């Protein structure tokens, strides 16, 4: 029987973290690098990808570099996967953390429901749901060849339950319909891929609860009151969850949604 240290070891494996220059993406990439993986940071801002990769390479035995990618564009998304495989010489792990969220500053998005636009809805679904579909298609062959293929999608509690709009009273925060709809779609896409890509590729999801990012105090207090563990999440809370699903610690886990929400959906 392998030791736990052997099971979590990612030495020699290659990963891409899509949205890796963002908050959760960076934490996920850092964990993979600490466990020995070589990681491509893929995000819209190529310069930020490069600087993030340089900073993360110093955190562990694995190395990192950045590749810019426009997830709203199919050709750019497919080329990012091909460039990743070429750079790493293999691909074992795909982590998709990129998304339009409630604070994404586009017109017709984080506004009252009657003001939400089809254009904003379409743009969000293109990034949140269509891009992981495209990436899975393009990465499938490399992941099947790796012997350790793992895809990790990022859902949301709002892909599981409806929003409690009382949390947002008196703030400028919003909860777009397209966010929850896209995240529900991501979770179903994960279940679909888990069965279609089996047995050579495992596909799972991590579903975070609300992450503390200096939200208005009224929202923060309401959220914490409603959460059994009595706090909002941090990026560090996602780090171990992604590492678990990426490594052989979860070698017999596929089609699973690992909910990291402090008990938010347990009520």
Image (cartoon, rainbow, N blue to C red):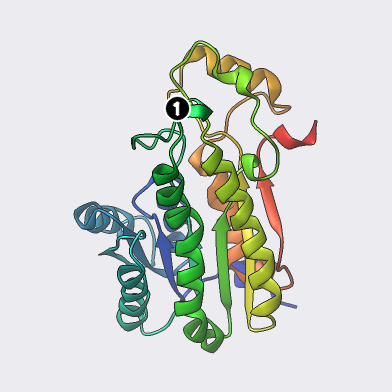
Residue furthest right in the image:
267
Q: Position of residue 104 (x, y in %)?
A: 38, 37
| Residue at point 47%, 84% (across, down) | 142
Q: Is residue 143 left or right of residue 62?
A: right
Return the x and y of residue 166 as percentages of the image width and height: 62, 17
**Helix, strand or loop at disc 1?**
loop
Q: Please report the residue visible at 65 percent of the width from the left and 38 percent of the height from the top.
A: 261
- Image quarter hosting the C terminus: top right
User: Percent x, y for residue 87?
Assistant: 30, 79
Query: Neighbour class for label 1 at 10 Å: few (<14), some, many (≥20)?
Result: some
Judge whether residue 12 can be spotted in this image.
no
Q: Is residue 145 above or below residue 59?
A: below
Identified at 51% across, 35% down, the residue is 176
Q: Is 16 placed above or below 128 here?
A: below
Residue lying at 64% horizontally and 40% vertically, measured from the top left: 157
Q: Which residue is mark 1?
A: 111
Q: Nearer the viewer, residue 236 or 213?
A: 213
Q: Is residue 229 above or below residue 132?
A: above
Asked if one can make out residue 131 in the rendered structure from this viewpoint, the answer is yes
Residue 192: horizontal and vertical position, in percent?
67, 69
Image quarter in which the N terminus is found = bottom right
The residue nearer to you, when weighing 223 against 125, is 125
Q: Tell which residue pokes out farthest to the bottom in this image.
A: 145
């Amino acid at each position: 029987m392998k030791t736990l240290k052997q099971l979590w070891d990612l030495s020699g494996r290659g990963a891409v973290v899509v949205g890796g220059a963002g908050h959760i993406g960076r934490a996920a990439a850092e964990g993979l690098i600490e466990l020995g993986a070589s990681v491509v940071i893929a995000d819209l801002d190529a310069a930020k990808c490069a600087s993030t990769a340089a900073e993360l390479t110093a955190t562990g035995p694995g190395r990192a570099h950045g590749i810019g990618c426009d997830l709203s564009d199919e050709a750019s998304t497919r080329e990012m996967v091909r460039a990743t495989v070429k750079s790493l010489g293999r691909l074992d792990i795909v982590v998709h953390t990129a998304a339009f969220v409630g604070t994404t500053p586009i017109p017709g998005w984080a506004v009252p429901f009657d003001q939400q636009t089809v254009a904003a809805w379409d743009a969000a679904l293109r990034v949140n749901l269509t891009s992981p579909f495209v990436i899975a298609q393009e990465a499938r062959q490399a992941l099947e060849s790796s012997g350790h293929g793992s895809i990790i999608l990022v859902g949301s509690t709002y892909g599981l339950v409806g929003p409690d709009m009382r949390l947002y009273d008196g703030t400028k925060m919003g909860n777009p319909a397209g966010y929850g709809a896209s995240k529900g779609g991501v979770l179903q896409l994960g279940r679909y891929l888990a069965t279609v890509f089996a047995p050579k590729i495992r596909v799972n999801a991590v579903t975070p609860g609300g992450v503390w990012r200096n939200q208005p105090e009224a929202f923060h207090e309401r959220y914490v009151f409603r959460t059994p563990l009595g706090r909002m999440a941090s990026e560090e809370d996602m780090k171990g969850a992604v590492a678990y699903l990426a490594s052989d610690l979860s070698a017999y886990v596929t089609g699973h949604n690992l909910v990291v929400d402090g008990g938010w959906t347990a009520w």
